[in-house]
Amino acid sequence: MASDSAAPFAGLTAYFGDLHNHCDISYGRGSMDEAWQNARLQLDFASVTGHAWWPDMPPRDGRLDYLVDYHVRGFEHLASVWDEVQEKTARAHEDGRFVTFLSFEWHSMRHGDYCFYYDGAHGEIVRAPDIAGLRAAIDAVRADGRRAMMIPHHVCYVPGYRGVNWSDFDARYSPLVEIVSMHGCAEHDDAPRPYLHSMGPRDDRGSMRAGLAAGLRFGVIGSTDHHAAHPGSHDHGRLGVWASELTRDGIWSALEARRTWALTGDRIELAFAVNGEPMGAEIAATPERTVRVDARAGAALDYVEIVKDGVALARRDAVGLAPQSGPHFRGKVALTLGWGERGEPTRWRARLGVRGGRLLGVEPRLRGEEAPESRFGFDGSFHAASVSTEGDDVVLDTRTWKNPTTRSDATQAVAIELEGDGHTRLVAEVNGQRLELSLAELRDGPRAVLSDGFVSPAWQLSRAIPEAEYAWSFEIEDTDPGRASSYYYARVRQKNDQWAWSSPVFVGPGRSARGSDPAASGREAFAS
């Protein structure tokens, strides 16, 4: 959806993607063909990533032999299918509809893990011995008239154990940092989504806050890092970009300019600017700064914050928000499928229709199957859904699994935006069951249906959420310039615990492309 309200984003459109995810081209599950099919269901652009190299892998010592063998097999498999990976990446691309990029992942105990991206569908696997080798490969690509970049991810692991090394980071090669994925969120130590993977907890030396405190300048993205052929798997991590067009050049240029934001799942459209310059920009210092946020979320907003130099500067929250009044309604309703106790997947065919109103938009919220133990050559199906619109109806075919724990969501959903009035009704037909409710009834709260009695698979129509609860704009004047150099970004939370973070705007002179010691910066800030 184009932004007409904020001048920095005039002529640009918000697109959503996932640049880091996996399938059976290395170690993972599901085919690359399924990965591209799943990506098209809910994304505008994607890259399907192969695990490629780990130069400083732990030695075989008995305890970690299985881990070494597992990775080596994955690297060898990717190399054997690399020509096919390039061909399928090229074939999946379609200007104006769906954009693809070629990528591979490079691990390092010392430097942290990076994904390496080409601006098209062709390129070589780079088995560099260190981060300088990756940069040399990027220089070679650029000298040949093409573009490449590398983006670090799960940066908050312990330094020396595949957490980022900020002193090695160079924004000339890495304009962006992945701060949220299935690993968790690396904004700072108190951020949502803690690290729960076997690689360990968060260490704040690798956080976004620490990197920015070290004087580094980078934008932020989210990715799924999903390992079962499902780019964009809901609630794992995604990114948004403000781009001039849905082409490789349009998306790549937006990535280089850092007009990006990270998000967890729901499609939160976020525009952030300082003194009329968009997220990712570097601007001259002024005594007063006008900071503006425009957020159009996927569900009811809890709060929107402006962060300056690591500290919340201003917040708008839902406290005291007046309920929408009047006969006209514009808002969102979600249909969610899942639950139950069955060991086998539940197949769903669902139709959600608007009667006496108008369907304005559809947002799939689809999850891929979780794959805690990735396997090679798995021959099961990982193409989980289809979504289509028929007039003012949306049709969803999918499957769900029992929620693995009472804190793990394995549901599938589709959200619609609609407009209508007091006579507008929503009609849901799900696996032969029918529920028809007015907007007035749904504005009071959600309705749920058990498909076959107690502990059977179930479905729900959410509360009808009026636009005033999910579309906010606010602006502040910051009259305290503070440091010679500062950064600002926006943090957004929905009431359903979905999040988004904008790339920063940087004010004042930058230090350099390389950073100082984050631990020293933290000690200096504490002492002051």
Image (cartoon, rainbow, N blue to C red):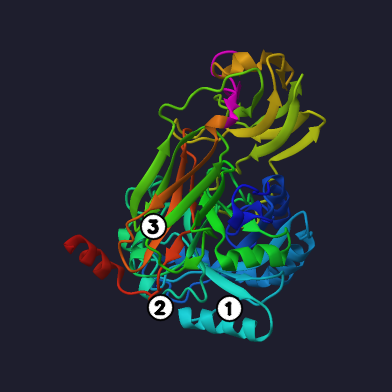
Q: Which residue is mark 3?
A: 199
Q: Are marks 1 and 2 in contact (CB under 8 Å)?
A: no
The picture quadrant where one finds residue 10 is bottom right
Q: Residues within 10 Å of mark 2 (few under 14, many from 20)?
A: few
- At x 37%, y 45%, the residue is 314
- At x 38%, y 73%, the residue is 110
Identify the amino acid type marked 2: Ser
Range of magenta residues: 453-467
Q: Residues within 10 Å of mark 1 (few under 14, many from 20)?
A: some
Q: Most extreme residue toward the left, as rendered?
A: 527
Residue 127 image offset from top left, x and y in percent:
55, 78
Residue 277 visible? The answer is yes
Q: Which residue is mark 1?
A: 126
The picture quadrant where one finds residue 399 is top right
Most foreground residue, 455 or 46:
46
Identify the amino acid type marked 3: Met
| First-in-chain label (3 vs 2) | 3
Mark on residue 512? 2
Question: Mark 1: which secondary structure?
Answer: loop
Question: Mark 3: which secondary structure?
Answer: loop
